[in-house]
Image (spheres, rainbow, N blue to C red):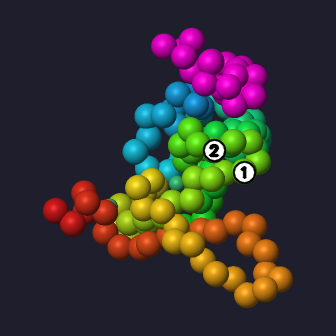
Amino acid sequence: MLKNLETDLLIKGIRPTAMRLLVFDYLLHQKSAVSLNDLEANFEKSDRITLYRTIKTFQEKGLVHQIDDGTTSVKYALCSSSCSAQVCLDLHLHFYCRKCDKTFCLPKTRVPEIQLPEQYNAEEINLTIKGLCSNCTQ
Ligand SMILES: [Zn+2]
Ligand SMILES: [Zn+2]
């Protein structure tokens, strides 16, 4: 199983160190986006800087994207395979649940094309919908 993860990292141009494989494996098993605090809580033996560097490497290589959900902590989630290094084409909406405090990717809900005035260059876009997730509305 870890062999496949290694291949996935190599395809993205990421050298598969033990730490990276563990973090990647962890991300694959999450249903909602994770913050650095979540990572730290899960990898008690690793220091925050190592975890931060790992996630930043993933981000630079287009393996994860950063989500600004309007809360105080930045969150990260895996990109779909259409993303390449530097350019994350994974432009989908995010959903923040105010009850369980989780942020979800909505990969099937694309960011609508937005017309900007001339000479405005968008560098990133973050659309987060807030409300109650499917678990919390039941
Ligand atoms: Zn919820
Ligand atoms: Zn996402």
| Residue 3, percent from left and from top | 57, 12
Residue 127 located left or right of residue 15:
left
Q: State yes or no: discs 1 and 2 in contact (Cβ < 8 Å).
A: yes
Q: Range of the magenta residues?
A: 1-21
The residue labelled by disc 1 is 87
Q: CA distance from mark 1 to mark 2?
A: 7 Å
Q: Nearer the viewer, residue 111 or 17?
A: 111
Which three-letter amino acid code belongs to the residue tagged 2?
Cys
SS for dot 1: loop
Residue 84 seen anywhere in this rendered image of the structure: yes
The residue labelled by disc 2 is 83
| Residue 97, percent from left and from top | 38, 66
Q: Residue at x 25, y 57 (%)?
A: 135
SS for dot 2: loop
Q: Main secondary structure of the magenta part?
A: helix
Looking at the image, the residue that sits furthest to the right is: 119
Q: Which quarter of the figure has residue 85?
A: top right
Which three-letter amino acid code belongs to the residue tagged 1?
Val
Q: Is residue 92 magenta?
A: no
Residue 6 located left or right of residue 47:
left
Q: Which quarter of the figure has residue 5?
A: top right
Q: Nearer the viewer, residue 1 or 42?
A: 1
Q: Residue at x 48, y 34 (%)?
A: 28
Residue 47 seen anywhere in this rendered image of the structure: no
